[in-house]
Amino acid sequence: MPDSRRLRVLDAAEDFAAVTLLAARSVRAHLAPGVRGQLVRAAASVSANIAEASGLGTGKNFKRQLRLALGSANECGSHLRILKRACALDIPGYDRCETKRVVVCKMLTSLIRRLEEEEAHSDDASHNRRRTREPSG
């Protein structure tokens, strides 16, 4: 599987996590108890899941970890919206985080889709090879 250092999505996820960590420092925790910590953990898990994916060795496990990363990114979106609605996170902080998060989600979705298409193409090619080897009756 791809080396995690070569995955652009990992770089984007690490940028998202860093921006989110900086924004979380300004969160007024008394307005949304616990959400700040959940946001920081979820943001960190996005890049961690992508890095873990690259070391798993199989396409199926790689895609599963990418889906977990996408789930964590979506979880972050929920936390960010809650913090914004509770006025616990300022609008510029929210906007910076959300912009980075959307980029990561789009990249993950695109990568997962591409892997699924490659897998389908590979399955079709394998099926066609088997059909050409079968004796005709």
Image (cartoon, grey):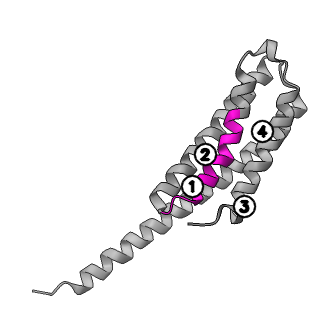
SS at badge 3: helix
On screen, 55 above or below 81? below
Q: How far, Cα to Cα, is label 3 from label 2?
A: 14 Å
Of callouts 3 and 2, the N-terminal one? 3
Q: Main secondary structure of the magenta part?
A: helix
Identify the residue at the far left of this view: 137
Of callouts 4 and 3, the N-terminal one? 3
> Residue 20: horizontal and vertical position, in percent?
80, 37
Q: Report which residue position mark 4 lands on.
A: 98
Q: How far, Cα to Cα, is label 4 from label 2?
A: 16 Å
Q: Report the magenta residues as a range.
A: 41-57
- The amino acid at mark 3 is Arg
- The amino acid at mark 2 is Ala
Q: Report which residue position mark 1 lands on.
A: 53
Q: Report which residue position mark 2 lands on.
A: 69
Circle 2/circle 1 CB separation < 8 Å: yes
Q: How far, Cα to Cα, is label 4 from label 3?
A: 18 Å
Q: Nearer the viewer, mark 4 or mark 3?
A: 3
Q: How many residues crowd mark 2 within 10 Å: few (<14), some (14–19), many (20+)? A: many
On screen, 46 above or below 63? above
Circle 3/circle 2 CB separation < 8 Å: no
Of callouts 4 and 1, the N-terminal one? 1
Q: Report which residue position mark 3 lands on.
A: 8
